[in-house]
Amino acid sequence: MENTGQSVSSWSAVDLPLADRFDQYAETMAKAMTPLRVVHCPTEAFELDMRWADLAGNTVFNVHGCPHASVRSVLDIERSEERVFHLLVNRVGEMHFDNVNRFVTRADDALFYDSRTRMTLDTPATFEIVNLRLTEDFVGKWVSDPDVLLGSRIDSKAGWGAALCAFAGQLTPEFVVRPPFSQELIVDQLGALLALAASHFDGAAHYAAAPGLRPRIHDCIRMRCSEVRLVASDVATALNISPRSLHRALAAHGETFAAVLMAARIAVARRMLISRLYDKLNAGEIGKRSGFADASHFARVFKKHIGLSPTELRAASRK
C-alpha cells in the first residue's frame, strides 16, 4: 500500500454559529474547490460536511449535507483564479442541474461542468456526492473537446458512463491518500474512462439529444440579429457555451449560424416592410434596422429569400 504522505482536509458547518454557516461555507469552497454561493436552504439549520484530498494534482471531495440550492454566477466566475472541470457523482437521491441545459441526475449518475460557465445545483433532499475537481491540463490530455460532456446526464446504467460513474463514485479522500498503488495509475484509469464516456456524447447525436440548447441559440439570434457585427462567438458567450458547441448544436439539425442569422434578419425586415408603422422608412433604412450593413446587399438577399424585392413586397402588402 502506497503512502503519499498527504492528509485529508475537512470542513463542517455543525460547530459554527447558524448565522456564520453560509459565509464560512462560501469562503471554504472558494479556497478549496471553486467560488459559489448558497441561494436557498429550506431547513432552519444549514448542515454540511466536506472532506477532500489531492489526487496527483486533481482533488477528490466527498460532500454530504442538507437540501439546498447553490449557484455559480458571472461574479463567481470572475473570482476564479483558474479554469477547472468538475465531475460530480450523485450518490443519493436526485440532483437538479442547470448548466447549458437543465436536467436531473438519479442516484449514482454523474454530471460534468466547466468552471467558466454559470451553473445552478439544487439538491432537494439530503445528499451525498463525490466531486472530482479536475485540472484543465488533465482533462485536455484525455478529452479533446470537453464541451461534448456539458449539459447532459452521464448515465450510471448505460455504456461507458456506467463504468465511469462506478469508478469515480468509489473515490474517497481516505483512499487516495493511502492508495494500494500509485496515484498516477488511479488518475490514468479515471482519464481513460472519462475519454470513453466522452466518446459516447461526441458528434451531432449528443446535441440532437439535448433539445434545450438549439431553441436557446435561435432565441438569442432572433433577439440580437439587428446587430450588424453579430458573430457566432457573441451568441456563444451570451449563452455560456463555446462557439464549437453552438455550431455543432445547429449542425445536428442541418443548420449553420449564418443561415439562421440571415433568416432572422429577413423575418425582421419582412415584418417591418408590411407594417404601416414603418411607412416613413425607406427599404434601405429597414435593411439597416434588420442588421444589414449595405442596402444593395439587403435588396439582393431579400429577393432571393422572399421572391420579391423589399419595395415590391411593400407595394403588394398595400393592395
Image (spheres, rainbow, N blue to C red):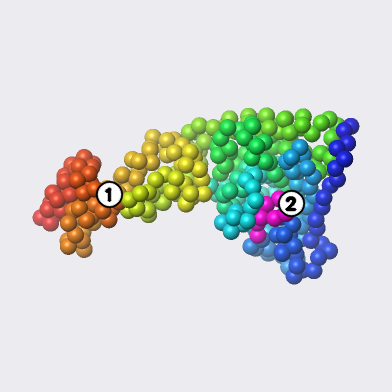
| Quarter of the image where one finds residue 186 | top right
Residue 35 magenta? yes
Identify residue for label 2: 32
Residue placed most toward the observer, 237 or 103: 237
User: As displayed, is residue 198 above or below residue 44?
Assistant: above
242 on left or right of 160 = left
Residue at horizontal 68%, vertical 64%?
A: 42
Given the current orientation, which residue lies at the most extreme left position? 319
Residue 274 magenta? no
Which mark is drawn over residue 60? none
21 on left or right of 216 = right
| Quarter of the image where one finds residue 188 | top right
What residue range appears in magenta?
Answer: 30-37
177 on left or right of 97 = right
User: As displayed, is residue 192 above or below residue 130?
Assistant: above
Q: What residue type is labelled 2?
A: Ala
Identify residue for label 1: 292
Q: Is residue 104 visible?
A: no
